[in-house]
Image: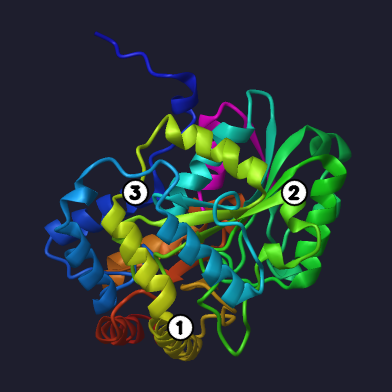
């Protein structure tokens, strides 16, 4: 029997990190001690108080039933208080906060809530692949906005053709940025809000790395800026700031109509978040600001170490302003895949090819900072042995 799949699925390549895992597994099977700088998965354990909350609350039989579709009052309240304390933005926890099974889920489902076949989504590239893939799975088309080094890896909204802007229904932003590590300030957000108002577009900002910024820079929220709630929502994740990637918890906040639409999709697809995980999320948001700050310091220390050591190898590198990634141009004579493969074959170290995040990522590799310091030092030692001229 020939299995007939949907046409939209034929347009979806294998998820980036599935292929990463395959390459690394092949090397390990051949006996190579691989050090991967590929996936941005924090290597430091979740803070103990968060784990203790999960253990304590999991024993309560009341939490063994279906959770609320729209999240616990406690978690929505904690999220709204955290946003107010962190960004000075007041939110109605009942109408302007929506818990998510990780922000990735919400990002993908937003496309189903907003887009129909024939619609356009304005997608920056290089970028987190889910903006594009969610659009395709909804039957719509991504229109790519290149993020170029000469523009600080910020989108040029003035370059979007008028006819494209009129067809578009959602505009994606992500700062601090994955994969480039770029950060953005008020002018970009103000411009994007006006652009969204003019063209009746939903502005969606992925702020998953808001707490991981360097050199004294403090990342803003889209919602801080005038008119943002009229057109936009923002996604937050507990994954990176509190080392909770495997817990799958985050939230969206902002425009209540957009959140209601996203919630309608979710109530028909998922059944909510395990209550003890939400209560552990409350602990994170209310009691672990210090852990988030220590995590930021750890990443800055690792960033500074890699920038210094890689510069010593003659590799051009600009320190990122935020996120947990270094976005490095490949040396002359290589393309992205060629350099990644060369480094893996020669040293057993894996860097993610930049073109995996979009055509404008060609000529770069992404290097994750979520590698234990000892392994990072081992990797640098191998690279020096192999590449120091």
Sequence-earlier tag: 2 or 1 = 2
Nearest to viewer (mark 2 / mark 1): 2
The kind of secondary structure element at disc 1 is helix
Sequence-earlier tag: 3 or 2 = 2
Q: Residues within 10 Å of mark 1 (few under 14, many from 20)?
A: many
> Measured along the vertical axis of the image, is residue 213 above or below residue 362?
below
Residue indicated by mark 2: 231
> Measured along the vertical axis of the image, is residue 327 above or below residue 8?
below
Q: Residue at x 86, y 53 (%)?
A: 158
Instruction: Measure the alpha-carbon separation of dots 1 and 3.
Output: 27 Å
Contact check, label 2 and label 1, Cβ < 8 Å = no
Find residue 120 and report its horizontal and vertical position in percent: 69, 34
Whether residue 172 appears in this view of the structure is: no
Mark identifier at residue 183: none
Q: 272 or 214, which is in the foreground?
A: 272
Find residue 111 and report its horizontal and vertical position in percent: 57, 37
Residue 374 located left or right of residue 324: left
Mark identifier at residue 273: 3
Q: What is the magenta range? A: 128-144
The kind of secondary structure element at disc 2 is helix
Q: How is the image coloured?
A: rainbow
| On-image quarter of the N terminus | top left
Whether residue 94 appears in this view of the structure is: yes
Sequence-earlier tag: 1 or 3 = 3
Q: 2 or 44, which is in the foreground?
A: 44
Q: Residue at x 49, y 62 (%)?
A: 77
Residue indicated by mark 1: 296
Q: Residues within 10 Å of mark 2 (few under 14, many from 20)?
A: many
Nearest to viewer (mark 1 / mark 3): 3
Residue 309 located left or right of residue 120: left
């Amino acid at each position: 029997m020939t299995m007939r799949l949907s046409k939209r699925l034929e347009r979806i390549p294998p998820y980036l990190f599935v292929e990463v895992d395959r390459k690394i597994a092949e090397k390990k099977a051949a006996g190579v001690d691989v050090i991967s700088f590929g996936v941005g998965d924090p290597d430091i354990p979740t803070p103990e108080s968060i784990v203790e909350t999960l253990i304590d609350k999991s024993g309560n039989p009341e939490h063994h039933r279906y959770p609320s579709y729209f999240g616990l009052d406690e978690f929505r309240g904690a999220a709204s208080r955290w946003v107010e304390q962190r960004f000075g933005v007041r939110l109605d926890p009942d109408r302007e906060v929506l818990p998510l099974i990780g922000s990735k889920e919400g990002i993908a489902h937003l496309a189903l809530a907003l887009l129909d076949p024939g619609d356009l989504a304005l997608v920056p590239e290089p970028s987190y692949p889910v903006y594009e893939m969610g659009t395709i799975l909804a039957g719509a088309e991504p229109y790519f906005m290149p993020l170029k080094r000469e523009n600080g890896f910020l989108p040029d909204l003035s370059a979007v053709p008028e006819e494209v802007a009129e067809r578009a229904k959602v505009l994606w932003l992500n700062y601090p940025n994955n994969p480039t590590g770029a950060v953005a300030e008020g002018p970009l957000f103000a411009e994007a809000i006006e652009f969204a108002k003019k063209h009746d577009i939903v502005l969606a900002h992925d702020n998953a790395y808001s707490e991981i910024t360097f050199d004294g820079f403090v990342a803003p929220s889209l919602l801080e800026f005038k008119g943002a709630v009229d057109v936009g929502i923002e996604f937050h994740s507990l994954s990176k700031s509190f080392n909770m990637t495997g817990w799958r918890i985050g939230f969206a906040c902002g425009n209540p109509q957009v959140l209601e639409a996203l919630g309608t999709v979710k109530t028909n697809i998922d059944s909510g978040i395990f209550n003890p995980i939400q209560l552990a999320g409350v602990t994170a948001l209310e009691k672990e600001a210090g852990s988030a700050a220590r995590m930021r310091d750890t990443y800055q220390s690792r960033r500074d170490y890699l920038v210094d050591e890689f510069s010593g190898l003659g590799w051009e590198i600009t320190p990122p302003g935020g996120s947990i990634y270094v976005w490095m141009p490949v040396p002359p004579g290589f393309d992205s895949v060629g350099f990644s493969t060369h480094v893996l074959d020669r040293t057993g170290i894996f860097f993610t090819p930049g073109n995996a995040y979009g055509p404008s990522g060609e000529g770069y590799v992404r290097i994750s900072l979520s590698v234990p310091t000892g392994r990072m030092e081992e990797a640098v030692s191998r690279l020096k042995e192999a590449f120091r001229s």
